[in-house]
Amino acid sequence: MQRSGAEIVVRCLQEEGVEFVFGYPGGAVLEIYDAIFKQSHFKHVLVRHEQAAVHAADGYSRSSHKVGVALVTSGPGATNAVTGIATAYMDSIPMVVLSGQVSTPAIGLDAFQEVDMVGITRPCVKHNFLVKDVKDLAVTIKKAFYIAQSGRPGPVVVDIPKDVTQQLTEFDYPAEMAIRSYVPVKRGHPGQIRKAVALLKEARRPLVYIGGGAVQGNAENEVRALVDGLGLPCTNTLMGLGAYPGSGDKCLGMLGMHGTYEANMAMQYCDVLIAVGARFDDRVISIPSHFLSQPKKIIHIDVDPSSIAKRVKVDVPIVGDAKHVLHDMLDLIGQSGARPAPDGLAGWWQQIDKWRSYNSLLYKPSDELIKPQFVVQQLHKVTGGDAFVTSDVGQHQMWAAQYYGFNEPRRWINSGGLGTMGFGLPAAMGVQLANPGATVACITGEASIQMNIQELSTCKQYHIPVKIVTLNNRYLGMVRQWQEFFYGNRYSESYMDALPDFVKLAEAYGHVGMRIERPADVEPALREAFAQKERLVFMDFITDQSENVFPMVQNGKGLDQMDLPAHMSDIQQAPLENNRDYGNMC
């Protein structure tokens, strides 16, 4: 039996077990939408903007172990999706984006709503396809799903001309997929693993540096076995939060530009560093030359060979899936008994505890003004630390990462690499649909939420009861912080003096709106909001405008040259006690 290209698209999605497609119809994809109307295997979620469709598919994927799917039309529909595609690409999120295209005879002729989607997305996808023959459609979609979720995950675009969706052919969907030119490595080289274990045995100041690859690679059990089994300190990147429990005594917290004092100092002064699914990016180590000024041996585990030694020279590169590599390392450690010497490790922990005792995340509470950190801490208390938390980008994102304390992977959903404002709300929609009945909170700012606030309409239509926690300081908060630090308090275009009444706006969309202005009302408001399990509640917390995110590593500074909160000012230039090898504290 012959089927149209549109029907083949739908059948392919059914074969892949797709539950939700996030999209927005238009002329080039109407055949596909008509085929969707005739089936009941998966549900389509109509967003109000194509960027939100891709972010929702992204949130769905990050919070599950599945590939997110978005469907957009040609021209502006396709270009509106690019920001979401780039967001997923930077954070290695598996996704398939189906875009409509003008009919094949019109390609290249500046037809109505034509853009070169393959050309536009080439720099920000794992791969992309333009399907010109309906006979190639099924196998191309199979390839897209295979590529998206294997090796280092990422988004794959399949651009489908309208005439291809109308043409007829036999449906034949491959059961398996193998691509001769694409064979991702899963297992690490045994010789390299032996070298890593030998280095670890000689370490006196070891540190495990955990990135998003440990989360995407489902390596949390192996990470925890390594850290707990050997008693090693560990630190998480922004994307790696939850791979090791934030409440665990071996966890030093997040590192990097806004990392904890103890995490950054340990990262700078360790002698053997085990990097698991992390890429030493600029927001983590700042300047490579300064980071490497303190001698250290580096073991770098990553499924993507192009990420290894991209920014820093490493001593033991191991290409492979984090879960498999760590499993093999643990087996070898168990067989050989190789582990760091207890006396060296004890001294290292003593130093770390000294750094930790300064409590770099301490802030001054207030009875008059709501501190944003306090809101996040109360959110953790009310949700029992068990919520899925999405965020947008800025100060609120950093406070969420610093103060929520994620104990499980895939609970912290944020745009790390691209830093996309407008990500939080649509991502929360995808998370909620992937995890029905779960508690989902979107921590955002009054500027970020307006980037995709139209998705309140989508939430109303599909009864998506996410809870929005807006830390409203009436500024583009991180922009204001940088302008205060580096631009002489010249707040150029960072003051939001024309904000809407978010309570009325939420109510206009059919949701519950709350405005909270006093610290004493924070916890009661959160409890009231989360008690309304079937409703979206928009909480507008009016927070202290002057609050900044600390610690902070300025551009051009090293990890041990942090700007610290006021209560630590007296130790910024003090040398480390009895540890000449570790240099100065800041």
Image (cartoon, rainbow, N blue to C red):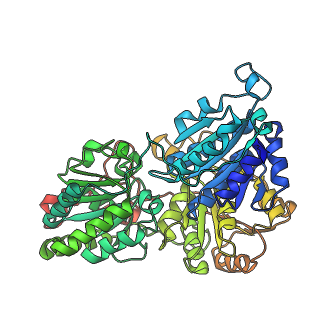
Is 157 situated left or right of 303 in this image?
Answer: right
Which of the two residues, 579 or 19, is positioned nearer the viewer here? Answer: 19
Q: Position of residue 289 (x, y in %)?
A: 25, 42
Q: Residue 361, located in which quarter of the rendered image? A: bottom left
Q: Say which quadrant the C terminus sits in.
A: bottom left
Answer whether residue 324 is visible to the viewer in this image: yes
Residue at position x 59%, y 35% from top?
121
Residue 216 vertical placement versus 34 (above, below): below
Residue 586 as seen in the image, left or right of residue 214: left
At a point 32% along the width and 65% down the height, the residue shown is 326
Locate residue 420, reporting x and y percent: 59, 48
Of 10 and 451, the residue lying toward us: 10
User: At which x and y percent is residue 342?
Assistant: 15, 76
**Which quadrant holds residue 309?**
top left
Q: Compared to 577, does 312 lie above or below? A: above
Horizontal arrangement in the rendering, residue 216 relative to residue 342 (left or right): right
Asked if residue 260 lies left or right of residue 399, the reply is left
Would residue 451 be visible to someone looking at this image?
no
Q: Residue reaching furthest top?
A: 109
Query: Is 493 located above or below residue 247 in the figure?
Result: above
Residue 491 position within the rendered picture, expressed as x and y whole percent measured from the top left: 58, 42
Say which residue appears at 20% left-offset and 50% top-offset: 315
